[in-house]
Image (spheres, coloured by chain):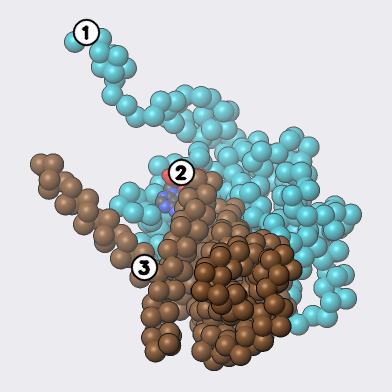
């Protein structure tokens, strides 16, 4: 075959493979939903996974939240000061966090901390035939291993995002009020007056739930689909972080476009 | 129904390349049978066919009178409750203790109260001599211990058929004898039927009732250990005596040596 033709052939093959994988992933996702009954009947299974996915991400989420909030405090003060509206610092910090940075940054951190761990764990279980062993024991690994992890991820994500935002607001307060000396009263009262529950907080929660679904579904599929070798598992782990980061950012744009169209 | 497992004319290939080409094999109840053959000849594949993880391209696999290839998922899972399998590397659940590994199926499939599960688990562990290791994690076990725990797990629900994939691989001579004796003893005391996949001829000839030799996708030879030891077939002779070259060649198929080294061209 001549070179350009070969190129086209390879492109076509890659495309077909990618489409087939998306199909597989979708089927896997619905199988997970379908086999979630066991997980909810035995909620202990989910709690255990919330511990390993959620609690273990806690430190990194809290520390990052604090720093992001402190940076927001500094940058916000710089900008607001030029317009003489330092008293709006609380609003700026809170809205940035609740609407955007909380869900998005917490999700990115969750993907790299918990998502990669999930992929590695499932991939290793597959490589060491633990999943096959489970099937031979007449226990469905999707119901027993995959579904509990999925729901644990979905439940953890909004909680982690909320903690991230709370920590961030505290960080903004530290820098703005304690360090720089912005008036404490207006910092809090303006925040209270301007942050809307439905418009801001609820939308932020919706975002983080969607991100939680995306990250955990991607991480589980990559692990389940990984070639059962050391190299296969390590590649799958990397792919989880890359894919879910991109998906988070893309979804964030789409969700933001829908949610905050009409907001002044 | 004397035969628990009946394999008739089974052919199978993972893709175009056929791995098994017309296998016939039976396991009578209460027997320990061995499937031997060199690495990569399709022994694990044969066990997967019996367990229904893969389906034959043609031919049939019957276990306890049921055609494994034609069962739906529910039927297959029902049948598998009567099967135990010892995987090649144990496949113990790494996030659970030894105790929880063995209790796993009891908790999943029965409503036994926790005290009874505890007693049952300790009895299984006692049978393989590892009652003292109940609280260890799989990562804390030696290779031989892990194999014994996996053995205890595969008989947790008192199955009627147990399959062992290379139970002797990578074990020291003492553990090897221990596992061999355990397989024989558990089969006799629990009334199991055992299928042992192995390439350890000497150890398995001591404990099995019947041997099948697989080579190049077909059953090359079969018989009782006595018949196998006396067998004049070159392939069996090579295998039993561990000779490096013979019908199973030392060299992977290749162009002629002279051609590869570009001699005389
Ligand atoms: N999942 C698979 N996909 C494709 N080929 C496989 C797969 N599993 C095994 N094989 C191939 O099938 C052949 C038989 O494998 P196996 O049954 O594991 O051999 P054995 O257990 O006798 O060493 C080998 O050549 C192996 O490369
Ligand atoms: Mg094998």
Q: Which chain is brown?
A: A
Q: Secondary structure at mark 3?
A: helix
Counting every numbered tag in the picture gives 3
A120 displayed left or right of A29: right
- Gap in Å between the C-alphas at discs 2 and 1? 36 Å
Residue for point 59% across, 44% down:
B198
Q: Which residue is mark 3?
A: A22
The location of residue B2, given as percent across then percent down, is 59, 67
Q: Is residue A47 left or right of residue A3?
A: right
Nearer to us in this view, B105 or B57: B105
- Which residue carries the number 2 mark? B41
Residue A144 lies, in percent from the top left, at 62, 73
Name the chain letter of the residue that bears numbered label 3. Answer: A
Dot 1 corresponds to which residue?
B264
- Percent across and percent down for residue A188 are 68, 82
Q: Secondary structure at mark 2?
A: loop
Give the quarter of the image for residue B12. Answer: bottom left
């Amino acid at each position: 075959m001549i070179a350009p033709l070969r190129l086209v052939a390879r492109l076509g093959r890659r495309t077909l493979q990618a489409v087939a994988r998306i199909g597989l992933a979708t089927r896997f996702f619905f199988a997970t939903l379908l086999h979630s009954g066991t997980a909810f009947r035995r909620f202990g299974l989910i709690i255990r996974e919330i511990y390993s996915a959620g609690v273990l991400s806690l430190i990194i989420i809290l520390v990052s939240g604090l720093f992001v909030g402190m940076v927001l405090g500094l940058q916000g003060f710089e900008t607001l000061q030029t317009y003489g509206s330092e008293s709006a610092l609380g609003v700026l910090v809170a809205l940035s966090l609740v609407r955007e940075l909380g869900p998005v940054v917490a999700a990115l951190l969750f993907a790299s901390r918990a998502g990669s761990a999930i992929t590695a764990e499932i991939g290793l279980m597959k490589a060491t035939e633990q999943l096959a062993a489970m099937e031979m024991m007449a226990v469905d690994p999707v119901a027993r291993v995959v579904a509990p992890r999925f729901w644990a991820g979905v439940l953890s994500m909004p909680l982690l995002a909320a903690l991230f935002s709370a920590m961030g607001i505290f960080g903004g307060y530290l820098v703005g009020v304690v360090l720089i000396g912005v008036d404490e009263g207006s910092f809090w009262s303006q925040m209270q007056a301007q942050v809307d529950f439905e418009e801001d907080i609820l939308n932020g929660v919706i975002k983080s739930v969607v991100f939680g679904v995306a990250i955990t579904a991607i991480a589980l599929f990559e692990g389940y689909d990984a070639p059962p070798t050391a190299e296969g598992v390590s590649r799958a782990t990397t792919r989880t972080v890359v894919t879910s980061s991109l998906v988070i950012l893309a979804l964030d744009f789409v969700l933001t476009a829908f949610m905050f169209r009409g907001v002044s | 129904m004397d035969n628990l497992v009946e394999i008739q004319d089974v052919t199978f290939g993972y893709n175009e390349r056929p791995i098994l080409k017309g296998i016939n094999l039976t396991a009578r109840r209460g027997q320990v049978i061995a499937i031997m053959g060199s690495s990569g000849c399709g022994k694990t594949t044969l066990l997967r066919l019996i367990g229904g993880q893969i389906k034959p391209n043609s031919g049939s696999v019957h276990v306890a009178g049921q055609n494994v290839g034609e069962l739906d998922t529910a039927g297959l899972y029902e049948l598998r409750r009567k099967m135990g399998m010892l995987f090649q590397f144990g496949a113990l659940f790494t996030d659970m203790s030894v105790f929880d590994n063995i209790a796993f199926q009891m908790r999943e499939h029965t409503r036994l109260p926790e005290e009874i599960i505890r007693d049952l688990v300790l009895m299984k562990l006692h049978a393989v001599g590892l009652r003292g290791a109940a609280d260890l994690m799989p990562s804390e076990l030696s290779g031989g211990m892990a194999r014994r725990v996996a053995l205890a797990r595969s008989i947790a629900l008192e199955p009627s058929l147990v399959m062992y994939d290379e139970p002797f691989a990578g074990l020291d001579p003492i553990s090897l004898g221990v596992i061999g004796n355990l397989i024989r003893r558990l089969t006799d005391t629990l009334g199991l039927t055992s299928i042992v996949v192995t390439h350890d001829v000497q150890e398995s000839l001591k404990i099995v009732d019947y041997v099948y030799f697989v080579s190049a996708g077909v059953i090359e030879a079969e018989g009782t250990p006595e018949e196998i030891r006396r067998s004049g077939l070159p392939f069996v002779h090579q295998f039993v005596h561990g000779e490096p070259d013979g019908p199973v060649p030392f060299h992977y198929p290749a162009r002629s040596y002279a051609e590869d080294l570009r001699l005389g061209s």
